[in-house]
């Protein structure tokens, strides 16, 4: 460092010593100022202003309030969901009961339909037997006439007196049979005989 104006180089030693000490103090202060400037730069980079902080704080409060509202809505929706799940379970059980009842009813209807079909087949068989009796030649009619019918016809339970009732049309043959000697002529021959 240069010698200040008004100081002599050959002056007293105490003045040089004071100057050296003053110079060291100034240098240390300059170094300290330089460090403080660096700290301030770092603080400016790492810290925010009060306005920014307050804005962020206000936003955080708003977000907390919105979060609380969302939690309340979520709890309500969860309650609705639990109720809906309960309803679904009840409806599923009811549907299962109705399905079982339907299957039982369907089985019953199928069974009845099978019985009715069997009855229909029996009736068709009987009708076919009667048709065979009423069609074809006289000899085939006599052979196809069921024997059990002939036996029951040959042994009537009672007799009808002539003139007890007037019988129209084809029924006259039946009345004629009942009034005639039952063992003499079977009903098929009466039915295929021309009415007199």
Image (cartoon, rainbow, N blue to C red):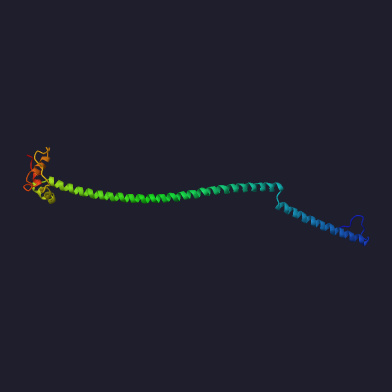
Q: Quadrant of residue 174?
A: top left
Q: Position of residue 2 (x, y in %)?
A: 87, 57
Is 57 on the left or on the right of 157, as rendered? right
Q: Residue at x 20, y 48 (%)?
A: 123
Q: Nearer the viewer, residue 12 or 48?
A: 48
Q: Position of residue 145 (x, y in %)?
A: 12, 49
Q: Position of residue 170 (x, y in %)?
A: 12, 40
Q: Residue at x 51, y 48 (%)?
A: 80
Q: Nearer the viewer, residue 57 or 41?
A: 57
Farthest residue to the left: give it. Answer: 184
Is 85 on the left or on the right of 98, as rendered? right
Q: Residue at x 86, y 58 (%)?
A: 23
User: On the rendered image, what quadrant is the N terminus found in?
Assistant: bottom right
User: On the rendered image, what quadrant is the C terminus found in?
Assistant: top left
- Total numbered badges shown on the rendered structure: 0
Query: From where the camera sits, is residue 137 visible?
Result: no
Q: Nearer the viewer, residue 99 or 151?
A: 151
Is 122 on the left or on the right of 96, as rendered? left
Query: From where the camera sits, is residue 178 visible?
Result: yes
Q: Position of residue 42 (x, y in %)?
A: 72, 54
């Amino acid at each position: 460092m240069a010698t200040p104006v008004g100081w002599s180089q050959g002056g007293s030693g105490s003045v040089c010593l004071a100057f050296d000490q003053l110079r060291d103090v100034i240098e240390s202060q300059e170094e300290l100022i330089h460090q403080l400037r660096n700290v301030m730069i770092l603080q400016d980079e790492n810290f925010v202003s009060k306005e920014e902080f307050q804005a962020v704080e206000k936003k955080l409060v708003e977000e907390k309030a919105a979060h609380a509202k969302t939690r309340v809505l979520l709890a309500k929706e969860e309650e609705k969901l639990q109720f809906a799940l309960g309803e679904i379970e009840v409806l599923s059980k009811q549907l299962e009961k109705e399905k079982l009842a339907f299957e039982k009813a369907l089985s019953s209807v199928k069974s009845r339909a099978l019985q009715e079909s069997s009855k229909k087949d029996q009736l068709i068989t009987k009708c076919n037997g009667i048709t065979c009796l009423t069609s074809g030649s006289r000899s085939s009619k006599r052979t196809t006439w069921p024997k059990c019918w002939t036996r029951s016809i040959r042994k009537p339970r009672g007799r009808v007196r002539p003139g007890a009732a007037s019988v129209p049309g084809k029924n006259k043959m039946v009345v004629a049979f009942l009034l005639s000697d039952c063992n003499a002529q079977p009903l098929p021959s009466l039915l295929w005989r021309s009415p007199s």
